[in-house]
Amino acid sequence: MSEPVVTKFCVIYDGPEHDNHEMDILTLGRSLSALGDVLYEANEIINGDRSSIDVRVNAEFIEGSFGFEIELLQSLAQAKNILTPLGLVGVAAGVTTVVSVINWLNGEEIKLINSEEGDVETIIAGEKQIHCSKDIARLVSNPIIRKCFEGFVNAPLQKAGTSSFTIKRSRDSEANELFIDKDTSKSFVKLSVEEIEKTEKTESNVKFIAANIKSKSGWKVEINGEEKLAKMEDELFRERLLNMEEPHIFGRSFNVKLKTVTKNKLGSKTQSFYIEKVHHETLGQD
């Protein structure tokens, strides 16, 4: 069995509250938990395995702040690096990462993610868009990943005595791998996704399979050979059924005014059907 790949980096919270190497125990606990969760979740998304990494912490003090060393061990053979796409360690200038996309979003809702050719996705927010790899798009659009970033970046920086969050390669390193201050941290909040709704009205042919004549809900119809749940909004038609003026509707085809409402949220699509008006029976159809 090959030796695990080990990557070490230091996480530092700075500000007046941490001058004596102190940090509120509840804030620290939640931050460590969120940081660990983001690494495990990212490994499952990118490498398809949650258990092939081990995350350890060394809490030896870093002067003038509260800092600790994280040790990430990846044991999966030929595993992809997870720290660079997240934007935590080893990022070259101009490279798109989860952190850079979150900064670009600046709290704005994701409207859509479009697949392009090859390993490219386009994230659309409002009237702007950004290109990134499929892995990064999957990470950015994952609710757990975004909630974890909120937990170890945004939440601690909301305390009055904490002014910045920094990642360095080592305790003695002068260069920052990542630096986030209070203003920038406002972008690191839970995932916000815009729901796109489209309404289409058509003249359609339907066959009634089930009906709840006392309610708008509980209707089942066949549309283009497929069974769908629908709401009956034609009150006059329901009244005719209640008055036994339309005694036999099942298995019969009717021309109707059909409203279809399609909701799309990051590729997850749902449809709702509403029968606004029942015109007449279609003769000669099964």
Image (cartoon, helix red, strand yellow):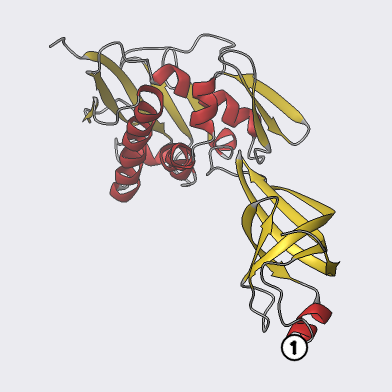
Comparing 49 with 193, the one in front is 49
Q: Let me know if residue 152 appears in the view.
A: yes
| Label 1: element kind | loop
Q: Residue furthest front?
A: 284
Q: Quadrant of the C terminus?
A: bottom right
In the image, 16: left or right of 210? left
Residue 125: quadrant of the picture: top right
Look at 29% across and 35% down and name the residue there.
21
What is the three-letter code of the residue carrying label 1? Met
Q: How many marks are shown on the rendered structure?
A: 1
In the image, 284: left or right of 133? right
* Vertical comparison of 84 with 201: above or below: above
Comparing 69 with 86, the one in front is 86
Residue 103 spot, x, y in % from top left? 60, 29
Comparing 260 with 81, the one in front is 260
Look at 35% across and 35% down and name the residue there.
35
Residue 19 spot, x, y in % from top left? 35, 35
Comparing 90 with 19, the one in front is 90
Q: Residue furthest bottom?
A: 243
Q: Quadrant of the N terminus?
A: top left
* Vertical comparison of 201 with 251: above or below: above
* Vertical comparison of 193 with 259: above or below: above
- Residue designated by label 1: 244
Q: Let me know if residue 87 appears in the view.
A: no
In the image, 269: left or right of 166? right
* Vertical comparison of 230 with 13: above or below: below
Look at 64% across and 78% down and name the residue there.
212
Residue 36 spot, x, y in % from top left? 31, 34
Residue 150 spot, x, y in % from top left? 47, 41
Q: Residue furthest left?
A: 1
Residue 69: quadrant of the picture: top left
Disc 1 packing (10 Å; few <14; some 14–19; many ≥20): few
